[in-house]
Image (spheres, grey):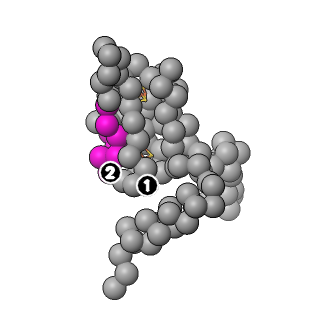
Amino acid sequence: MVKFSSVWELLKNIATKEGYPPPVSVDEDMCSGCGICAGLCPYEAVNIRRENGNSAARINTTLCRGCGVCAAACPSGAISVNLFEDSQLFAQVETPQASRL
Ligand code: SF4
Ligand code: SF4
């Protein structure tokens, strides 16, 4: 049996080689190091790095599944989801609702 995690890992490695960005990225200038994202990530893919008195979130792209929970919860807006544009996300949400009308 093929594990989903193995397929995901393979696809991420291919995407990285092709030059695609990681699933999410952190703007360290905007990050306060509050740790909310690290506490909520279901895959334990966020670490809070403390250096020279400053704290910032760092994403482990091997563990990250791109779910977007961290980006939605970040009070500073420091996390960007790179896989989808906003319009693509809204289209995903609106399509099932529209089909029920
Ligand atoms: S929730 Fe936002 S501000 Fe807080 S540590 Fe994570 S990225 Fe930084
Ligand atoms: S996108 Fe999801 S899996 Fe990736 S770091 Fe954020 S909460 Fe974790």
Could you say where residue 23 lies in the image, as x and y percent from the top left?
Answer: 52, 49
Mark 1 residue type: Arg
The residue identified by callout 2 is 43
Q: Left of 61 or right of it: where is 46? A: left
Location of the C terminus (image quadrant): bottom right
Q: Left of 32 or right of it: where is 38? A: left
Give above or below for 91 relative to 46. Answer: below
Question: In percent of the image, x 55 and y 66: which residue is there?
Answer: 14
Sequence-wise, which precedes: disc 2 or disc 1?
2
Could you say where residue 33 lies in the image, as x and y percent from the top left?
Answer: 36, 23
- C-alpha gap between disc 2 and disc 1: 8 Å
Location of the N terminus (image quadrant): bottom left
Is residue 42 a member of the stretch shown in magenta? Answer: yes
Mark 2 residue type: Tyr
Q: Are marks 2 and 1 in contact (CB under 8 Å)?
A: yes
Q: Is mark 1 within 8 Å of ligand 2?
A: yes
Could you say where residue 54 lies in the image, as x and y percent from the top left?
Answer: 35, 17
> Alpha-carbon neighbours of circle 2 within 10 Å: few (<14), some, or many (≥20)?
few
Residue 5 visible somewhere in the drawing: yes
Question: In percent of the image, x 55 and y 57: which residue is there?
Answer: 16
Question: In percent of the image, x 37 and y 81: which residue is there?
Answer: 2
Give above or below for 76 relative to 94. Answer: above
The residue identified by callout 1 is 65
Q: Nearer the viewer, residue 55 or 37?
A: 55
Residue 31, by quadrant, is: top left
Magenta region, residue range:
40-48
Residue 19, by quadrant, is: bottom right
Could you say where residue 48 lies in the image, as x and y percent from the top left?
Answer: 31, 31
